Image (cartoon, helix red, strand yellow):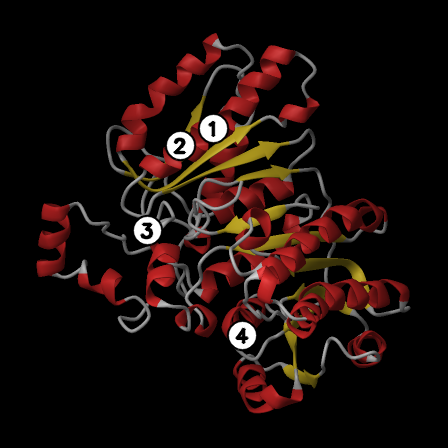
Amino acid sequence: MSAMSDPYGSFVRTGPGKLLAARTGLPRPPRLRRSVPGQGLLDGPAAVVGLPGASRVDETTLWLRNAGVRIARGEEPLAALVVDATGLRTVADLDELLTLAPLFRRTTGRVLVLSAVPATLTDPEARAVQQGLEGFVRSLGKEARGGTTVNLLRVAEGAGTALRSAVEFFCSARSAFVDGQPLVVGPGVPVVRRDRPVAVVTGAAQGIGAATAQVLARSGHHVVCVDVAAAGEKLAAVANSVAGSTLHLDVTAADAPAALATHLADRFGGADVVVHNAGITRDRSFVNLDAAAWSSVLAVNLGAPVRLTTALLEHDGALAPGARFVCLSSINGLAGAKGQTNYATSKAGLVGLVEALAGPLAERGLAVNAVAPGFIETPMTAAMPPIPRELGRRTSSLQQGGLPIDVAEAIGWLAQPDAAGIDGQVLRVCGQNLLGA
């Protein structure tokens, strides 16, 4: 993050800034560990701890070792702490969480708690105990310091490859801005993809869309970068930077669904990944909102994903086997935001779309999820008034805005075949913002 994007965050990392923040109690946003080429999974050792009834310690330890992670011995500082709490069933069992305090104190990086899926438990006490772990994780995330994140994986029966993939993602630098979040990991079976799978990203000319194109290209995808013709120069620059291709398309046009489906089927033999990223804002208080501002936001942010997805599902050859959809929601869609009734409606609607599609798509071997960004440093947020902009940055556990790459990394992970057990869910990339669930 540049000084121009967050001058306060840059200032408090200087000598005088640190001194001032320490004396006045002002927030001191930590420098987050983000992914860079050639980086290992962790930059230090990890500890894997099993609480009573744990069943995932051995395989989790093996996964981390196979990923090049050293398992800690003694009292050394930890880069990651993984806790298997899947077996906790009684209120008395929760006392075991207190034994984690010394390990938490030594951890500067990632804390990941594994739990059972509460909804699958029939015993009331057992379900209450497992549900309680969410409150524990969210609270611990707010106490963590130095950019340490705390997250919760709810492990369903039969979760294997998807759990390994999730453990690696949440322990890695790719999850730098994901904090305090629960996610269910199911038993999905990954599909073997072709040598160069095809990904489609709408709204790819800048911001999160451009960053997503970079991440997907990094993992071997040919990226079809989609945006309106007016963004042609920027779109071409993005596509050239990832050795991808461009498609000028107004996603709200009547012929857009058929045009996209035909393009993917005829040119590429179908898409392996579809990212519905295109979005706009037209902020205004509800009483001052005109029909054009309302309908344009709904058309781009919600109507287009509905229509495009329907067309891709119906058009023979538009999707490759095991294709994955990712929709860009927003924490403002989960929590609401003053002056954004149109935007929040559209982004909440995407969550409903994901939930409705998950079952039918799973029957076809496909999957769909949503990512809900919090405050992200983009041209859109740079145009906000100063006070709301600063509040947006500081009201997360990490005390700063995220970067487009943070959202792109989450999308890139959900797009991978190994994440097949993640389906019908919403992953917040918000630094554990105070807004929303």
SS type, badge 2: helix
What residue would you read off at disc 3?
399
Q: Amino acid at mark 3?
A: Gln
User: Mark 2: few, some, or many residues within 10 Å (few <14, many ≥20)?
Assistant: some
Q: CA distance from mark 4 to mark 1?
A: 35 Å
First-in-chain label (2 vs 4): 2
Q: CA distance from mark 1 to mark 3?
A: 20 Å
First-in-chain label (4 vs 1): 1
Q: CA distance from mark 4 to mark 3?
A: 25 Å
When asked about the image quadrant of residue 233, the answer is: bottom right
Going by the image, does 428 lie left or right of 35? right
What residue would you read off at disc 2?
139
Residue 186, x across and y down, in percent: 68, 37
Q: CA distance from mark 2 to mark 4?
A: 34 Å
Q: Residue at x 70, y 84 (%)?
A: 247
What residue would you read off at disc 1?
135
Q: Are marks 2 and 3 in contact (CB under 8 Å)?
A: no
Q: Residue at x 33, y 61 (%)?
A: 387
Q: Residue at x 59, y 54 (%)?
A: 371
Q: Amino acid at mark 1?
A: Gly
Residue 166, x across and y down, in percent: 55, 44
Residue 210 image label: 4
Q: Are marks 4 and 1 in contact (CB under 8 Å)?
A: no
Query: The N terminus is located in which quarter?
Result: bottom left
Residue 89, x across and y down, in percent: 56, 13
Q: Amino acid at mark 2?
A: Ser
Residue 28, x across and y down, in percent: 23, 51
User: Mark 1: few, some, or many residues within 10 Å (few <14, many ≥20)?
Assistant: few
